[in-house]
Amino acid sequence: MEITIKVNEKRITGKRSPMIYGHFIEHFHRQIYDGIYDPGHPLADADGFRTDILEAMRKIKVPVLRWPGGCFVSSYHWKDAVGAHRKPSFDKAWRVEDPNTFGTDEYIRLCRKIGCEPYICTNAGTGTAEEMSEWVEYCNLESEGQYAKWRIENGSKQPYGVRYWSIGNENYGSWEIGAKSTDEWGRLVREAAKMMKHVDPCAELSAAALPDVDWNISLLKNCGPYLDWLSIHEYWDMMAEKNCPADYEQSMAFTDRIDHSVDEVRGILKAMKLDGQIKIAFDEWNLRSWHHPNVHTIKQGVRKEEYITPRDKNDDNSTYTMADAVFTACFLNAMNRNCDIVGMANFAPILNTRGCIYSNKEGIVLRSTYHVFDLYVNYMGDTVVDLWAESLPEMTVTGKDGKAHTVGTLDMVATTWSDRAGMALAVVNKHREEAFELCIPQAYCGAETVIYKLEGKETDSYNDVGKTEVFIEKEELGNCHEGMKVRISPHSVNVIWLV
């Protein structure tokens, strides 16, 4: 089947922030300890960081890294993990001991090693507005007060200059330690934001939100003047209690309204005339939720085999197939199309659990989703322009809910570069079996045409230790000519260069 598209470079949707390709790391399972931070490991550097993981992070140019949570943060007290005398604490969110050997200073060191912006999420569960503002003091004041002096004493004379701060994590949810009502949340965020801005007026603040009218209106009425961002989260394939991953077709069903929460929050911001001031930080997202049974329930697991051992199932690399890659690309396309209001997004997490990088004692595996970030970060342009077609194919798939869902078969975004000529097209084919012929617009005749393809032989193809089935292939197609068509393979993610 042939698909004819049209592109108008003069109709600009917006300038895409690199932070929509951001990531997230939490003190959960093997993300920090026995993950990125593993002093004594043969591949660790002098600061205890795994150099192979750092290299993989640098390749996808991680622009911003959210930390330390996640649910973990809602009982985390940052002062316990700073300075020479640290004591282990019991993490009430995940019910394990945290040695506190990785804290603020180590996190900033990690961000500097990979060249990304730090984004600190504060404790709005058991924490206080004062504790949050003291964290800003530690990071951003030159020398005033005991906390800036403490940072200097700990070896960092210059302020860290942390620009991005989140007040809380999912405090609307019953599962969160220190959950709040709408009224409680509005008051706490206002007082925390007030104190944090008094410490550093240049700090940009987000607060936990969701596509809920009552919650957001209360929050924005109380705190709108203080906020720069609203933080929203979403996982589509929910597996917290039962680890039963959606198959390829079920995963495609989740793409029918992949950006619904952006649309809903945009509407609230627009109605309150705050859409010019506040942007959306989609700062925790993934196709599949993390598997952690018997901890976010009223009845808790008693034996570790009931609530800790099952977390190892997150690290089954066969779970992360072309379904994950195609979904991830569709999400990133949606964020590009909404780049006028979405300024940040954070894949959750970057390492282990459901991450795009998997580590073990011997090395790392780059899962299918890692290569999607490689494509978008390194090959897509930074300016989103208008792309349309008179008709696009649709397909009907059966979702995990057992219902039929009609979804577009192709998902496409057109971008240009602000510093050079040319165009980059992201083209995602969700169809399990059918290929398409994409007709290149005649306006690009003469341009050098290159396609970067991410595909697997099967929809269930995946990467594992000693096994690489999903990877990027480059094909040079020569100069574009009239009537030129580019083949878009089934279940694939592609970036086409016309330069």
Image (tube, rainbow, N blue to C red):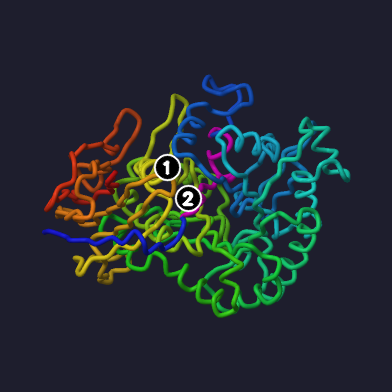
The residue nearer to you, when weighing 168 against 422, is: 422
Secondary structure predominantly adopted by residues drawn in magenta: loop
Q: Secondary structure at mark 1?
A: loop
Task: Where is residue 84? Give x, y as percent.
Answer: 79, 31
Disc 2 vs disc 1: Cβ atoms closer than 8 Å? yes
Task: Where is residue 416? Give x, y as percent.
Answer: 37, 51
The residue where tag 2 is placed is 347
Residue range in magenta is: 16-35
Q: Is residue 129 magenta?
A: no
- How far is the residue under mark 2 from the one under mark 1? 9 Å
Amino acid type of disc 2? Phe
Task: Where is residue 169? Give x, y as percent.
Answer: 62, 59
Left or right, 126 with respect to 174, comes to right
Q: Is residue 364 above or below residue 482?
A: above
Q: Is residue 17 magenta?
A: yes
Q: Which label number is shown at residue 460?
A: none
In the image, what residue occupies the spot 29% across and 38% down? 472
In the image, what residue occupies the spot 47% across and 40% down? 352
**Which mark sits nearer the N-terminus, 2 or 1?**
2
Dividing the picture into quadrants, the one containing residue 8 is bottom left
The residue where tag 1 is placed is 356
Quadrant location of the N terminus?
A: bottom left
Seen from this angle, which residue lies furthest right?
Answer: 145
Q: Residues within 10 Å of mark 2 (few under 14, many from 20)?
A: many
Left or right, 84 with respect to 322, comes to right
Left or right, 56 with respect to 457, comes to right
